[in-house]
Image (cartoon, helix red, strand yellow):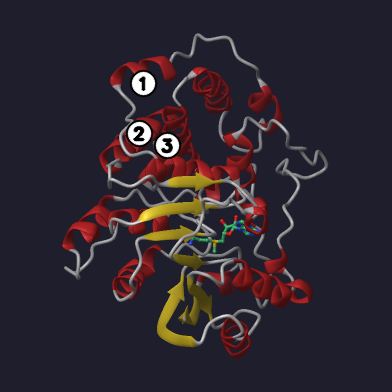
Amino acid sequence: MKQLTFPLLLEPKAMKRMEIFPLMRYMGSKYKLIPWLHETFSELEFDSALDAFSGSGVVSYLLKSMGKEVHSNDFLTFSATITKALVENNSTLIEKSDIDFLLNLEVKSDNFIETTFENIFFTRDELIFLDKISQNISELTSPYKKALALTALFRSCLKKQPRGVFTISGNLEKYDDGRRDLKLSLKEHFLEQTKLNNKVIFDNSKRNVSYNENIFELKNPNLSPDLVYFDPPYVPPSDDNCYVKRYHFLEGLSKYWHGEKIMKETKVKKIQKKFTPFSYKKTAIQAFESLFDQFSESTLVLSYSSNAFPDLETLVSLMKNEKSNVEIKSKPHRYHFGNHATALRSNVMEYLIIGRD
Ligand SMILES: C[S@@+](CC[C@H](N)C(=O)[O-])C[C@H]1O[C@@H](n2cnc3c(N)ncnc32)[C@H](O)[C@@H]1O
């Protein structure tokens, strides 16, 4: 995936940081819309922000780069691990001695990954590598080093999947187009990704926090952000939008599958999907209503794309229940991601719905 280059915008320093942010291929990621989000956030007055559905962490990192106190949240542990490593963490790096420790493959480890994913994902040696490095990561005492090592590992694993998802298994040769990402070993990727992580750690002089909660349960009394950014999943016109189906391997890896139940009958050994009301027509409208009510004290910014349910009019009217001033910004956008040919090329209008008092 190409790194972004941005024209000099309002805050060249923030945009420079975004140019080195290691991108991750993630369904619905807003990385291509970062300049637009940056412009929009720059027009609003706020010191603290909650990125309620942080996904790849790119928007949280933008907010951090803009000098805001950032609270990030995602109910997937692997997403929350990324923001712990790159947003909450203001100074911890992975040092040479940590690398030596992490890459000690002589260590005794469980062989859960090797036995569970044999002939499904990766080679046998790579599966053993993942068991060993997971053991070493579990022994790190610094939570930030743990999060950094896992973040490097997530990106490494994803880069080795030809289509950037864990829905297909077995012989992937037909997808091998000679890409460098497919040629590099997991260990080589890991070393590269660790360096990239180290480059983007910085202190924005704020106490940033990463949460791993269902958004409706994020009711911390100390959390009263000036602005909340929402980028939830939307009910798609076809297919589904299940993140666990696509990224179950990374979610499992984030906790070495502890507390997760593998669905043994599935080809790719998925874990159970997590229910979110945003994915179903029956529950989505009520979910938005509750969400806006939960954060009614804050400025609200909602990302929305035109090919989804509920429609723009409904969302605007729901936001108007809580906010007296609701503004819509729009921009044509092309998503290059999905599980089938049509999703790979969907042209949509991307909206930002902004609610203020
Ligand atoms: C569209 S993605 C966010 C993408 C992100 N803005 C980015 O640029 O990478 C939606 C995210 O919402 C998360 N999610 C879905 N339902 C949730 C819930 N009820 N509570 C917290 N997170 C949820 C998913 O795990 C997913 O990462």
Q: Mark 2 near ligand 1 (CB under 8 Å)?
A: no
Please provide percent x and percent y for residue 150.
48, 34
Q: Are marks 2 and 3 in contact (CB under 8 Å)?
A: yes
Please provide percent x and percent y for residue 310.
65, 81
The residue that appears at 57% across and 74% down in the rendered structure is 342
Q: Residues within 10 Å of mark 3 (few under 14, many from 20)?
A: many
Q: Is residue 234 visible?
A: no
The residue that appears at 65% across and 80% down in the rendered structure is 309
Q: Circle 2 sits on which residue? A: 194
Q: Which quarter of the rendered image does ligand 1 occupy?
A: bottom right
Kind of residue sitting beneath label 3: Ala
Q: Nearer the viewer, residue 310 or 270?
A: 310
Q: Circle 1 sits on which residue? A: 99
Kind of residue sitting beneath label 2: Thr
Q: Is residue 279 visible?
A: yes
Could you give the CA–CA distance between mark 3 and mark 1, rounded to whole angstroms? 12 Å
Q: Are marks 3 and 1 in contact (CB under 8 Å)?
A: no
Q: Is residue 240 above or below residue 43?
A: above
Q: Are marks 2 and 1 in contact (CB under 8 Å)?
A: yes
Q: Residue furthest bottom?
A: 313
> Which quadrant holds residue 116?
top right
Q: Circle 3 sits on which residue? A: 152
Q: Is residue 347 above or below residue 13?
A: below
